[in-house]
Image: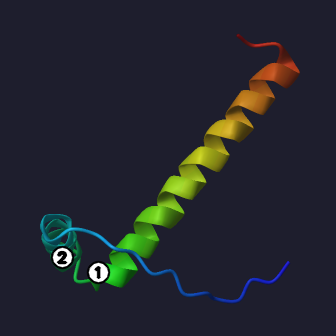
Amino acid sequence: MDMGTSVLSLRIDGELLERLRGHASKRGMSVQDYVVRTLIRDDFDERFQTAVEETEKFYGVT
């Protein structure tokens, strides 16, 4: 699996961009870094939840 980087272009409205700038600024980050970190965290949360569900199925927990 290729783990290189790719470019993703997004079109967002000005209000959302300003909110993202504010969130990023509070953390001393660029908007790009903030968005990437948020996506990575969300992806991890989804993968973790799937792992929990699979474990519960395996052990018969409902």
> Residue 22: percent from the left, percent from the top?
13, 72
Residue 34 location (% of width, % of height): 34, 74
Sequence-earlier tag: 1 or 2: 2
Q: Which residue is mark 1?
A: 31
Answer with left or right where residue 36 lies relative to residue 7. Answer: left
Which of 7 and 39 lies nearest the eye of the viewer? 7
Give the total number of marks visible in the rendering.
2
Q: Quadrant of the N terminus?
A: bottom right
Rendered view: 50 above or below 7: above
- Residue ID at (69%, 33%): 52
Please state if 17 lies on the left or on the right of 5 as rendered.
Answer: left
Answer with the quarter of the image where residue 44 lies: bottom right
**Residue contact at pointers 1 and 2, CB within 8 angstroms:** yes
Q: Quadrant of the C terminus?
A: top right
* Mark 1, other Cα within 10 Å: few <14 / some 14–19 / many ≥20: some
Q: Write down the residue under mark 2.
A: 21
Task: Measure the alpha-carbon separation of dots 1 and 2.
Answer: 6 Å
43 with respect to 25 (left or right): right
**Residue beneath the point at 38% across and 81% down:** 33
Looking at the rendered structure, the kind of residue marked 2 is: Arg
Say above or below: 46 vs 41. Answer: above
* Vertical position of residue 54 compared to residue 27: above or below: above
Give the residue at x 73% y 39%: 51
Q: Amino acid at mark 1?
A: Val
* Mark 2: few/some/many CA within 10 Å (<14, 14-19, 20+): some
Which label number is shown at residue 51? none
Q: Secondary structure at mark 1?
A: helix
Residue 6 or residue 29, whichever sits in front: 6
Seen at 84% across and 19% down, the residue is 59
Secondary element under disc 2, as helix, strand or loop, is helix
Relative depth, front residue between 17 and 36: 17
Q: Does 24 sit above or below residue 2?
A: above
